[in-house]
Amino acid sequence: MRQVQGLNRVPSVENYDLFNKIYQKSKLARTQQSSQDLLYEGDQYRIQQSQQMLVEYLKDLNEMIEDVVRLVDQLHSLNEQEVNSLFQHLKKQLRNLKSVIQSIMDLMLGKGKSPFQAQKPSHVNIVMVNTIRTYLVEVYIPNLLETAKYALDNFEGYKETFLKDIKIASTQLIMINLIFGASVDIDKNSLFSLDKNHKDWKELYQICERKSLGDVERINQSFNNFANTILIGHAIMGKSSRFKNEILKKIQLAINSVYYQIFDAKKEAFTNMSQMKAQNAIEVMNMIESPAIKKIMAMAYPKIKVNCKIYIDPVVTPISIQWINNQLKTGQLNKVTSQQIKLINEELHLDPNAKSILHKFDPQKLRIRILCNSSIDDTSSSWFSNQQQHILHDTILVHIHGGGFIAHSSSSHQSYTREWAIKLGIPIFSIDYSLAPKYPYPQGLDDIWQAYNWILIYCYKHFDIQPKRIIVAGDSAGGNLACALTGLAIKMGQRVPDGLFMAYPALDLRFNFTPSYLHALTDKIISHTILGICVESYAQNPLTQLSSDPFINPILLSDEILAKFPPTRLMCGTNDPLHDNTWAFASRLLKIQKNVQFTIYDQICHGFLCYKTIKGMQEIQVCIDDAVAYMQELINLSKS
């Protein structure tokens, strides 16, 4: 039997009348005007035309969905109880989708009471609504058609895979329903609602370098080979998580590890991701932290002279959720207040014996990994046995790893941080902050804040490091924390980093809809369920005010704080669900005339700095080198 890719196949529907009817409607919809063609500025008549056009498009879409529901009813004739229960759930989500679309149409036609913030047709964000409509008619519905048609033709041989496809499709539809309704109320002046010829976009293009890593087919194949190892992990953990008994779970892990090296793990992985629970996500994402995998990964790391870990106590008054909410209540959180920073634990940090216990493992303390390819002259430590001439380091990099706030460590990110340390020739302080959900916001941010202040105040007492220049870098969740740290230093009147580098940062955890979030529906690295788990885990403190806190959503940092930001460099891939965060933050900085530049890599997904591993994407070396070049540029700018 031929291999079926289900929801990821290009549609090739034929024969059946109902299939042909839906497919022809889908083809016709694709010839309709794009989202940007619906934009007309200043011409009231053409604005009304756009509104009327969108209503017609939505009518067509609702008819198409009704046809899909009838198709689902046909599949009920298979008389399979398990299948029918799944299809009942799918039908429910399709009905919900129809309801959302009908509510938008009623609003556009001035009928009834609007369930949205928008109360008039002129308030509706036509571009965002049409973006999701286009995704439905061009991607989601054709893929669902292909899956259903193949099931009718080959049900007995396809049943198990088919059940997984329907589970995945239903979960995707839940997310589509959420973002479809939310798209109505997106600010019509937001960056992604503007025509690409708008001056804001033209200015952004001037500071953006678009880059290809090579032939598209070769890059896609290389990524798929790498992503397959991730999918195998999802499939293995998904199967094993069903066992409560630890012994049975380990046996199942061993069996699945062999099984999915032989058989395709893709479908099982996507099924697992579509129904993933928080603990399951944490286990999968932390597989690279297991001792066995760490040893394998380390074989590909370049050798480096200094790789040590230190353990520190808090240095300044902690950043607590109570302090944050008090600041919000008084309107001070997003302002430069230059509060006097109060030192704590001074007797510990100034103790003559502090140096001897700095390297002593202590799980209750904050861990920082130091990487450097030359001596940092820690004369008290036996593992720096080669006494060399003192080299006073006056430039350092503070690194904050990614992992969705719930996973990873400084160890698993050495695939690129070691290269950075070697090529930049400076010490890197990579911070192992506390992870959610055990330690929700703002604990991770406070850990970063404590480490940063320790480096500023006490580092020179233990190492030949007196930083005149500090670059802060972070990827993904680490990009969020790096940006928040920079904003916090500005707010509190602390020494501001001299440069900020962020790779594919998660800067808006509110996840207000922008087009790139649609990638999460089929993404192999961060699916929409994983994104949701990461945000819920990090922001689970009941006192967290997710919608208004700029230190959990750095995209909300005020112009007053951003005005004091250092030169900033960013990078991201076009296929990343967080792709739009990079453009949006660059736009904020550009509007207040800050020094900002960024690189966008064609056909590249989220988390790419970590792809260069054994059996990974060697093409990512270009991105690692580009990051080095950006950080070297930031260092040079700080010298001028």
Image (cartoon, grey):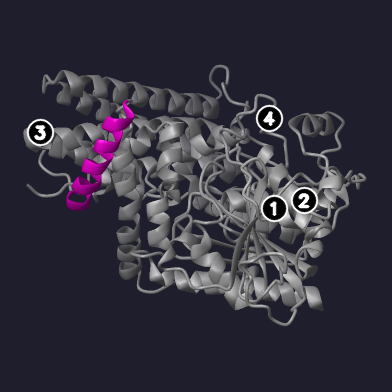
Question: Label 2 is placed on what type of residue?
Answer: Gly
Picture mark count: 4
| Residue on which the image places disc 4 | 544
Q: Earlier along the polypeptide chain: callout 1 or callout 4?
A: 1
Q: Which mark is residue 483?
A: 1
- Nearest the viewer among 563 and 64 is 563
Question: Disc 2 to disc 1, how far (Cα)?
Answer: 6 Å
Question: Disc 2 to disc 4, how far (Cα)?
Answer: 18 Å
| Residue on which the image places disc 3 | 155
Q: Callout 4: 10 Å neighbours few (<14), some, many (20+)?
A: some
Q: Secondary structure at mark 4?
A: loop
Give, as a single range, the part of the protein colored magenta.
245-263
Extreme bottom residue here?
389
261 falls in the magenta region: yes
- Residue 417, position in %: x, y? 56, 65
Q: Callout 1: 10 Å neighbours few (<14), some, many (20+)?
A: many
- Residue 321, position in %: x, y? 74, 31
